[in-house]
Every structure is written in structure tokens, then in C-alpha cells.
Image (tube, helix red, strand yellow):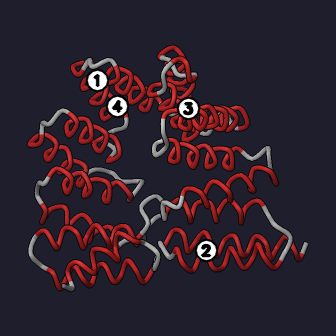
């Protein structure tokens, strides 16, 4: 009982560090835990997620594989391993990517099999089915089957699936209709507005995209990471930098979450301030990012740039 209690305590502490974006502390604690005691699956999974946040895909994969080997019946561990494989696949040549894509599908399908009510696992699997060619196990029929299952847990998200399918078929009118149905059924949830904004960005309808992000900023917001994602959309589109800055400051003043690590939020805020000519402010944000994740190369490069 004591060992189990200590393991749970270490995991809770590391989870808090991940949620706060204190990646260096989380990695140090987890590596210490895994080197000084019998390896446990939860710590291995958390270490995977820390490396995932740092975009260190090889170490993320290795840690996630360890978690799965130690607890093969845990849906979450398969989901994170599938995500790590997916990120690696995007950066490989065609043949290597095809091999990894098969692993992505296997892990996502296993995650859903182990926990059919896990909407995150179903959404990731659905996205794979939409984006992957049939030869790699993708297909519209499979995506629609997932939509029906998702609807039993979250009826609004079913329409996100239909919107993504329509987009993949270049049917923008149907896609927009489905995104707006998603907004209506979610009662104007901020995440639904975010997905519409992303669609409008892909359509190069930038004024409407901004309007959607304004709606997002005023909407119910169960997931605060939408503020960071919305700010990133504005930055990439070269629009409304002061508004994007405001969204990020609002996020950092709240409680950051693992889905949008604080070190990345500080980095993005630095980029926005730099674009607005505030190099001193940008440098402060880059340093804040590096204080949480000293190996975050993009922040170091940006700090070097503004200091010269």
C-alpha cells in the first residue's frame, strides 16, 4: 500500500507540473522516479507526454511504448502512443510514414476498444480515418461509424465529424453548415467556435475568421487551451496582433493546462510582442519560456534574435 501511495503521489505531482507547463521539473522528477524504483506505467506515460510537449518525438514514443508494455489494457496509454507515432509519421518519408500510420491506427483502435466512451480516442481515430487513404486503413464509412458512436456521448461533436468529412471532399458549403450546427448544438461552446475559425482560416476568409474568434473569446470555455490556439491562428494569419496578445495574457493569468503548455504560450506571446516592435517584452517572454523548458530550441533562437 505504501509503494502504491508513493507512486500515486509522484504521478499527481508530475501531472501538476505538466499542467503548469513546468516541463523541465516534470522530466527530472519522472526520470528520477523511473530510475530509482520499479518502473510504473503512469510515470512512463507522463514522461511521454512531457517529451511530446517538447516535440521530442523519439523519446515520447519510447516512453509511451514503455507505458503500454507495463499496462497494455489502459486505453489512455494506447491513445498517447498513437499520437506519438502520428507526429513521427508526419516527419518521415513516404515508406516510413506508411509503417507508422499503420501503428497509429492500431493504437487508436485499441484505445477505443478498451474504452468505447473515450471521446478523445474516438475523435483521434476519426481524424485518422478521414485523413488516411484506404490502403492505410482510412475511409469515410469508418469515420461515419465513429460519428454515430460519438453522438451517443456528445451529439454536438457528431457534426464536427461530418464537417471534417465534407472538407476532405472539398464540399465547403456542407462543411460550414455542419460546423455551425456543431456550434448550435454545443450551445455556443468556445471550442466549436475555434473549429469554425480554423475552417474559415483554411478558406482564407480572414475577416469572418476574426469574427469567429471574437465570438470564441466571449463564449463558455470549458477548455482554456482554445485561447492559445485562437491566438496562434491570428498570428499565423497576420491579423489582430493586439487581440491575440490579449487572449494569451488572459490564458496565462488563469491556470494553464497541459494541452497548451505555459512555455509555449510564453513563446507565442513573445512572437506577438516582437511583431509589434516590443523587443524587450518579447525577450522577457522568451526567457519565461526557457525558465520552464530550457531545451525549447525555438525560444532560445528567438531570444538570440532579439538580443542582437
In the image: residue 181, left or right of residue 275: right
Quarter of the image with the N terminus is: bottom right
Tell me, for residue 27, which label it has, or none.
2
Total number of numbered labels?
Answer: 4
* Image point (28%, 66%), residue name: 268
Q: Nearer the viewer, mark 4 or mark 2?
A: 2
Where disc 3 sits, the SS reads: helix
Residue 283 sits in which quadrant? bottom left
Residue 238 placed where, x, y %?
A: 13, 54
Query: Where is mark 3, residue-wise?
Result: 98
- Up-down relation of residue 64 to residue 5 (above or below): above
Provide the residue designation for mark 1.
175
Q: Nearer the viewer, mark 3 or mark 2?
A: 3
Between disc 1 and disc 3, whose residue precedes?
3
Q: Which mark is residue 182?
A: 4
4 or 1: mark nearer the eye: 1
Toward the top, the furthest residue is 141
**Of pointers 4 and 1, the one earlier in the residue sequence:** 1
Amino acid at each position: 500500500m505504501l509503494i502504491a501511495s508513493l507512486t500515486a503521489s509522484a504521478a499527481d505531482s508530475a501531472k501538476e507540473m505538466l499542467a503548469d507547463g513546468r516541463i523541465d521539473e516534470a522530466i527530472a522528477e519522472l526520470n528520477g522516479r523511473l530510475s530509482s524504483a520499479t518502473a510504473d506505467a503512469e510515470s512512463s506515460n507522463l514522461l511521454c507526454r512531457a517529451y511530446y510537449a517538447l516535440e521530442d518525438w523519439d523519446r515520447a514514443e519510447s516512453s509511451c511504448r514503455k507505458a503500454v508494455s507495463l499496462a497494455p489494457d489502459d486505453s489512455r496509454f494506447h491513445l498517447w502512443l498513437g499520437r506519438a507515432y502520428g507526429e513521427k509519421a508526419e516527419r518521415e518519408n513516404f515508406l516510413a510514414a506508411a509503417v507508422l500510420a499503420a501503428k497509429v491506427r492500431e493504437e487508436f483502435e485499441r484505445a477505443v476498444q478498451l474504452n468505447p466512451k473515450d471521446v478523445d480516442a474516438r475523435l483521434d481515430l476519426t481524424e485518422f480515418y478521414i485523413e488516411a487513404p484506404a490502403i492505410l486503413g482510412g475511409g469515410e464509412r469508418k469515420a461515419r461509424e465513429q460519428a454515430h458512436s460519438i453522438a451517443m456521448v456528445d451529439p454536438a461533436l457528431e457534426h464536427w465529424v461530418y464537417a471534417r468529412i465534407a472538407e476532405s471532399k472539398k464540399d465547403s458549403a456542407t462543411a460550414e453548415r455542419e460546423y455551425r450546427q456543431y456550434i448550435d448544438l454545443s450551445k455556443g461552446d468556445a471550442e466549436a467556435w475555434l473549429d469554425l475559425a480554423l475552417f474559415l482560416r483554411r478558406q482564407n476568409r480572414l475577416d469572418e475568421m476574426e469574427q469567429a474568434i471574437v465570438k470564441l473569446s466571449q463564449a463558455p470555455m470549458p477548455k482554456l487551451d482554445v485561447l492559445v490556439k485562437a491566438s496562434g491562428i491570428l498570428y499565423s494569419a497576420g491579423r489582430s496582433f493586439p487581440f491575440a496578445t490579449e487572449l494569451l495574457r488572459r490564458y496565462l493569468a488563469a491556470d494553464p493546462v497541459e494541452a497548451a503548455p505555459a512555455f509555449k504560450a510564453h513563446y507565442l506571446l513573445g512572437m506577438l510582442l516582437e511583431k509589434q516592435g516590443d523587443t524587450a517584452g518579447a525577450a522577457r517572454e522568451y526567457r519565461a519560456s526557457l525558465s520552464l523548458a530550457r531545451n525549447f530550441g525555438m525560444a532560445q533562437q528567438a531570444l538570440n534574435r532579439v538580443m542582437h
